[in-house]
Image: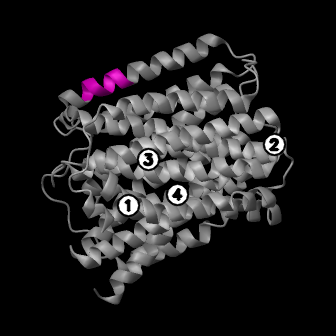
Amino acid sequence: MPVRGWLVLCAMSMLQFFIAVDVTVVNIALPSIGSDFGVDGHSLTWVVVGYTITGGALLMLGGRLGDLLGRRRTLLIGTALFGAASLLAGLAPSYPVLVTARLLQGAGEAVALPAAMATIVLLFPEGPERSRALSVWAAVASCGLVLGFALSGIITAHLGWRWIFLISVPFIVIVIVAALVLIPADRPASREPVRLDLPGALLLAACPLLFVFAAIEAGEPGTDPWVSVAALAGAVLAGAWFVRVESKSPNPLVPLAFFADRARVRANLTTMLLSGALSTSFLLFTFYLQDRLGIGPLGAGLTMLPLAVALILASVLVPRLLGRWGARACVLVGLAAAAGAMAVVALVALQGGGAAWLLPAMLLIAAGMGFGIVGLQYIAVSGTTEEDAGIASGVQRAADQLGGAAGVAVYVGLGFAPALHAGDPFVVAGVLAVIGLMVGAGIISRSPSATAGTSEVAQ
């Protein structure tokens, strides 16, 4: 592969890194953001879920836009939107503007990432070169997620929370320039362009947004309970309408026949429940370290480093075990580890333990993420063909992001809701997450054991 291909990979990996960083980089900064804007932990969940929920909900639309407008053009549009939204978030004069910026960041991610990955796949021929390129891509994403904790603490402590968004802007400009210079222009559109399922995309975005709004507003003091009821009804209506639209669309965003495979459906449902618990754990660690123990942003970020190291080790070890144990066994181990972590968080909160007592929870969360997510990804794409492999990957990633956002909204939103007076918020959120994980274990236990072919994953 010419040098140009590897330069493009570096640019796309830089974009991937900052998109992944923005998933976790806000966690340590949340107390500082809340202090500046006078917002409590309950309402701060929007800073987290606003990004992930729009990214997950619009991901399938982003892939379709690449077919319609061309991958290079779509990549430039999505990257520019992500960069502009990052600048807006860093300069936000009020909390509503910050939340709006996070929603726009998610939209930029959804448009840019599918085009970026497609660019890599097309530049590198199938075989060892493409495998190496995609391995670099995945490794960069993992590093971005885990380094987000440390970067958040360092930046917030020394520069202020606004720079966790502003620091990515010059790098995004570099990505845009590299794309303009290195990536060939899109071919002229065919005479029969891909038809865009815009109604399906809007409904797919509206459903989780209304659900999250209902969960967060349910515990807001002074809010009419009928507001949450109406939002929840709207989410159900949007979901039902989405199914109806997709069943009649000539070019559906997600063909309903794709879900005829029950193992695939169970894997995606379990992914949502596990991701909800994982995302909740990150927030609970942050709030406990800073709000309960009074540790500053830098100290909190450094305290989270064992979690980052454990996640890296898990990403190396788990694929080998997947080949020996089978996907379903790995998923059950991951669910059990995550449930154990949430139980540890609840116990530490009840006993008022110090930061060191959270270490077992961090290690268990790393195991839950490594075993569970990898195993679920394998099950979710098993049995796919060239025609539906892209859809399978997109749906699985969307389930991951939407599950994380919904979990934070329900578990943290209800646990920390001042209007509910449900007791210790860490205990409530932890118990809710454990219940969700138990449901996930019941769902995936009914799937056939996925062992055949898993040795390929370990290679």
- The mark nearer the N terminus, 1 or 2, is 1
Q: Which residues are magenta?
A: 239-245
Question: Which residue corresponds to the image point at 81% horizontal and 35% vertical from the top-left?
Answer: 351
- The mark nearer the N terminus, 3 or 1, is 1
- Quick one: SS at disc 1? helix
Outermost residue to the front: 324
Task: Between label 4 and label 2, give the one nearer the viewer.
Answer: 2
Q: Residues within 10 Å of mark 2 (few under 14, many from 20)?
A: some
Does 58 appear above or below 259? Answer: below
The tag on residue 79 is none
Q: Quadrant of the C terminus?
A: bottom left
Give the residue pinned by disc 2.
Answer: 353
- The mark nearer the N terminus, 3 or 4, is 4
Outermost residue to the right: 294
Question: Is residue 12 visible from the viewing direction of this image?
Answer: yes
Give the residue pinned by disc 3.
Answer: 372
